[in-house]
Image (cartoon, rainbow, N blue to C red):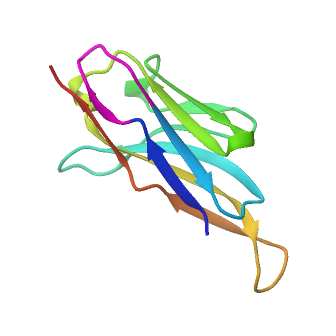
Amino acid sequence: QVQLVESGGGLVQPGGSLRLSCAASGSIFSINNMRWYRQAPGKQRVFIAAITSGGSTNYEESVKGRFTISRDNAKNTVYLQMNSLKPEDTAVYYCNADGTVPDYKYGGRRTFGSWGQGTQVTVSS
């Protein structure tokens, strides 16, 4: 079972910065893609950014140029550097990861997909 734990959320003024972290733990063979999503009050969870194991990145249009996703493969951790924050960035931010773990029942490996519990980011003066 792979657990994802986010940290780094909080209250920040408009124009400020925050850095979110998400660490994966458990018996992990490999982590392929790591992603960040966010969910604002009363709205659906939406994709924000993704990074592959090779470091290729992809961003939702509204955060391009302001947010940067990165990862430390040795630590099984993904980061989201958020700059020039706006009130509309206020949301609960979730990380998501997929990869492979040991298959203790049949041997070999099986795929996994996991979500973190979320961290609140509030942008307000």
The quarter of the displayed image where residue 84 is located: top left
Q: From this viewpoint, is residue 53 visible?
A: no
Q: Position of residue 23 (x, y in %)?
A: 57, 47
Of all residues, the one furthest to the left in this rendering is 125
Q: Is residue 14 magenta?
A: yes
The quarter of the displayed image where residue 29 is located: bottom right
Q: Is residue 16 left or right of residue 55?
A: left
Quadrant into which the N terminus falls: bottom right
Identified at 53% across, 54% down, the residue is: 4
Of all residues, the one furthest to the right in this rendering is 108
Identified at 61% across, 42% down, the residue is: 77
Q: In the image, is residue 102 above or below residue 100?
A: below
Q: Position of residue 40 (x, y in %)?
A: 25, 43
Q: In the image, is residue 112 above or below residue 14?
A: below
Depth check: give the residue in front, 2 or 112: 2
Quadrant into which the C terminus falls: top left
Identified at 42% across, 44% down, the residue is: 37
Q: Position of residue 22 (x, y in %)?
A: 52, 44
Q: From this viewpoint, is residue 34 visible?
A: yes
Q: Position of residue 95 (x, y in %)?
A: 48, 48
Identified at 23% across, 19% down, the residue is: 13
Depth check: give the residue in front, 50 or 1: 1
Q: Is residue 21 left or right of residue 12?
A: right
Q: Is residue 111 magenta?
A: no
Q: In the image, is residue 52 above or below residue 28?
A: above
Q: Which residues are magenta?
A: 9-19
Q: Is residue 49 left or right of residue 46?
A: right
